[in-house]
Image (tube, coloured by chain):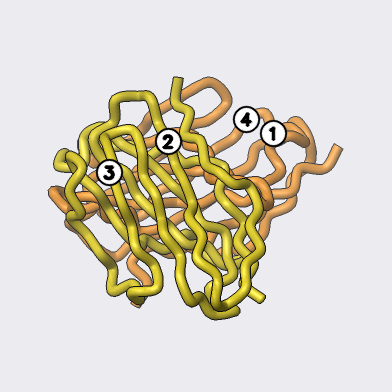
Chain colours: A orange, B yellow
């Protein structure tokens, strides 16, 4: 039973345009959400996070939106750059669930020049 | 500084070998984690140490043995592994493991191949 779902295994975007990566979750106890970027054979790099008390968090080109009623979050990258090409993982954490990050399966983003 | 270091970067071992993976962080974080990641899959949690005590063991076989010598170091001792244990082993650390808003920072991983 997947608690965090990333239904698009891959996404291709033109350089300079917006990339939108989506994530759905089923557990209403999740209260903290994170996005990680991963290159092959490297560890995940933390990108941006959002607490469930917010609906938007922005950091430079990256913005995460949270819709709690729909149990949906999305990562927007504007403008997209070729260096953004990587696998993006959505992860969620339940209140008080110490150590337990639940990851989605990832979306592979390709940004074409 | 959010750096977590891991050694070695690559490791090839036979099924009868004993080896160790090492992880270090100097951010003063209070929790450290071991994850296993297979190709095209998300990371899977193996162990969590909070305040140098093992707090989570996700039903990992005993051929994997974690050790936390101090708050900055985390080891994973390997013995009698199977070829299916070949994977990328990731270490992570975080500062507030018992709080909701807690971000884990990952190391670059050790690529393990079991022959």
On what subunit does the disc labeled 2 rest?
B
Mark 4 or mark 2, which is nearer to you?
2
- Mark 3 or mark 1: name the one nearer the start of the chain: 3
Q: How far from the left and from the top, in percent, is residue A105? A: 51, 63
**Rendered residue at 47%/62% (across/down):** B36
Category of crowding for the residue at label 2, using alpha-carbon neighbours closer than 10 angstroms: few (below 14), some (14–19), many (at least 20): many
Q: Which residue is mark 4?
A: A78
Q: Could you tell me if the residues under marks 4 and 1 are in contact, i.e. CB atoms within 8 Å?
A: yes
On what subunit does the disc labeled 4 rest?
A
**Rendered residue at 62%/73% (across/down):** B14
Q: Could you tell me if the residues under marks 3 and 1 are in contact, i.e. CB atoms within 8 Å?
A: no
Q: Can residue B97 be seen?
A: yes
Q: Secondary structure at mark 4?
A: loop
Same chain for marks 1 and 2?
no
Query: In which quadrant is the C terminus of chain A drawn?
Result: top right
The span from disc 3 to disc 1 (Cα, nearest Å) is: 25 Å
Horizontal relation, residue A11 to residue B79: left or right:
right
Q: Which residue is mark 2?
A: B24
The span from disc 4 to disc 2 (Cα, nearest Å) is: 34 Å
The span from disc 4 to disc 1 (Cα, nearest Å) is: 5 Å
Mark 1 or mark 2, which is nearer to you?
2
| Number of numbered discs overlaid on the protein picture | 4
Can you tell which mark lies on residue B85?
Answer: none
On what subunit does the disc labeled 1 rest?
A
The span from disc 3 to disc 2 (Cα, nearest Å) is: 25 Å
Q: Secondary structure at mark 1?
A: loop
Q: Which residue is mark 1?
A: A80
């Amino acid at each position: 039973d997947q608690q965090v779902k990333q239904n698009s295994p891959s996404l291709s975007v033109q350089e300079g345009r917006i990339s939108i990566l989506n994530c759905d979750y089923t557990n209403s106890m999740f209260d903290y959400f994170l996005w990680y970027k991963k290159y092959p054979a490297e560890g995940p790099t933390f990108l941006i996070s959002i607490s469930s008390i917010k609906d938007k968090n922005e950091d430079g080109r990256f913005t995460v939106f949270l819709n709690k009623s729909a149990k949906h979050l999305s990562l927007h990258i504007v403008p997209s750059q070729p260096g953004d090409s990587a696998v993006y993982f959505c992860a969620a954490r339940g209140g008080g669930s110490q150590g337990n990050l639940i990851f989605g399966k990832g979306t592979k983003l390709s940004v074409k020049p | 500084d959010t750096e977590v270091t891991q050694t070695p970067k690559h490791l090839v071992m036979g099924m009868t070998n004993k080896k160790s993976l090492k992880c270090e962080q100097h951010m003063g974080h209070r929790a450290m984690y071991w994850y296993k990641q297979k190709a095209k899959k998300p990371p899977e949690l193996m162990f969590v140490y909070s305040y140098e005590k093992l707090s989570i063991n996700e039903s990992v076989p005993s051929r994997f043995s974690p050790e936390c010598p101090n708050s900055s170091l985390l080891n994973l001792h390997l013995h009698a592994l199977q070829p299916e244990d070949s994977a990328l082993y990731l270490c992570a650390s975080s500062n507030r493991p018992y709080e909701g808003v807690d971000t884990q920072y990952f190391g670059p991983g050790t690529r393990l191949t079991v022959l």
